[in-house]
Image (cartoon, grey):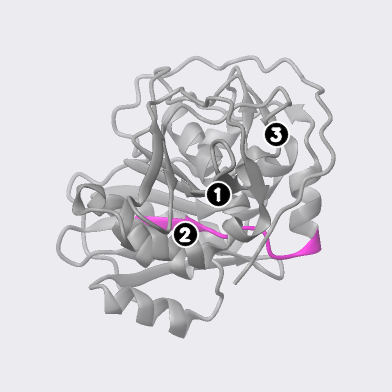
């Protein structure tokens, strides 16, 4: 299924974002790993962990080997290439559907300019899922996050989400619908008690508009200027009553939290990870953070 966010409007405006100091908050939970698929640039300068370090996890983009210089690449991660926006500080992998499944890879903070052709077809989430299956088991956590969390990230049909989770030995334990179409799901492994939280990507005209609102703005008391549309999309979800009661209230029971998303969902997942790791007491942090239970526990299945 092809879901594309074509961003035609880039307004390189910025605002000053006064950072709120990091607190002594060792009891707060955080995002253990972040996995994004076909996600656009989100901020300037690059988003980081609260201590200024790199996020654990990977940023994945689809590529294709061709005779054209650096080959072809998913169009969405390239849209802000010539703007004052940056990818987050995280390791990056370009996937390929033929030959070695890892076409290219870059260390945290590296986002080199590439001479390639930008292809809409490479943004297809189904292609991301099939390419992830071809990765070796050294990427086991990312592969699980894709087939358990990412695969169900666009559907509001809880029977489908539940069945997909169970097929891989996980349980659906939380779900939220914000507005008419934005969904977020929480699944947990019954033995490890690890959780995967997913955010939906672009499916509606409103989502396309959100992607195009490229003014930089403040977020979560951080020093970076963040994409206004992505910030608003995240706030819309996490401040919804459904997310608060059905997802956020359960995060404290997880032994770890991995966050995933495709396209707009990957951008939203990145902002969520950056904010909960800030641990700075800002309003955004207060709406997303959770206190870790001293003993993680099994969450009731939906």
Instruction: Check contact, mark 2 vs mark 1: CB within 8 A.
Output: yes
Element at label 1: loop
Specify whether residue 8 is in view: yes
Q: Which residue is mark 1?
A: 38
First in sequence, mark 3 or 2: give its number: 3
Q: Quadrant of residue 187?
A: bottom left
Q: Which residue is mark 3?
A: 80
How far apart, in angstroms, are the residues tagged by discs 2 and 1? 8 Å
Using residue 271 as the reference point, say whether residue 134 is left or right of it. Answer: left
First in sequence, mark 3 or 1: give its number: 1
Q: In the rendering, which numbered label is found on residue 273?
A: none
Q: Which residue is mark 2?
A: 128
**Label 3, residues with CA under 10 Å away: few <14, some 14-19, many ≥20:** some
Q: Front-most of 253 and 90?
A: 90
Q: Quadrant of residue 247?
A: bottom left
Q: Give the magenta part as a residue range.
A: 196-205
Image position, residue 256 (x, y; %): 27, 47
| Residue ID at (67%, 43%) | 230
* Residue 239 position (above or below residue 114): below
Image position, residue 198 (x, y; %): 47, 58
First in sequence, mark 2 or 1: give its number: 1
| Residue ID at (20%, 53%) | 137
């Amino acid at each position: 299924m092809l879901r594309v966010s074509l961003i035609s409007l880039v307004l390189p405006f910025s605002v000053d974002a006064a950072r709120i100091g990091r607190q002594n908050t060792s009891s707060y939970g955080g995002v253990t790993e972040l996995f994004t698929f076909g996600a656009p640039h989100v901020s300037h300068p690059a988003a980081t962990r609260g201590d200024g370090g790199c996020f654990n996890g990977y940023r994945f983009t689809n590529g294709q080997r061709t005779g054209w210089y650096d080959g072809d690449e998913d169009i969405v991660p390239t849209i802000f290439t010539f703007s004052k926006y940056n990818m987050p500080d995280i390791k990056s992998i370009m996937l390929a559907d033929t030959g070695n499944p890892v076409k290219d890879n870059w260390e945290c903070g590296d986002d080199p300019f590439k001479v390639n052709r930008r292809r809409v077809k490479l943004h297809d989430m189904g292609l991301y899922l099939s390419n992830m299956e071809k990765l070796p088991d050294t990427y086991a956590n990312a592969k699980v996050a894709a087939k358990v969390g990412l695969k169900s990230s666009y559907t509001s049909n809880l029977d489908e989400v539940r069945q997909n989770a169970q097929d891989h030995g996980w349980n659906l334990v939380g779900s939220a619908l914000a507005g008419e179409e934005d969904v977020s799901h929480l699944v947990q492994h019954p033995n490890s008690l690890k959780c995967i939280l997913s955010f939906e990507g672009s499916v509606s005209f409103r989502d396309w508009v959100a992607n195009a609102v490229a003014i930089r703005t403040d977020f979560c008391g951080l020093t970076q200027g963040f994409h206004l549309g992505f910030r608003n999309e995240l706030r819309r979800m996490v401040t919804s009553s459904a997310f608060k009661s059905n997802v956020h209230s359960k995060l404290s029971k997880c032994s770890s939290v991995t966050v995933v998303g495709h396209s707009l969902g990957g951008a939203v997942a990145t902002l969520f990870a950056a904010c909960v790791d800030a641990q700075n007491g800002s309003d955004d942090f207060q709406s997303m953070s959770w206190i870790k239970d001293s003993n993680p526990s099994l969450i009731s299945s939906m």
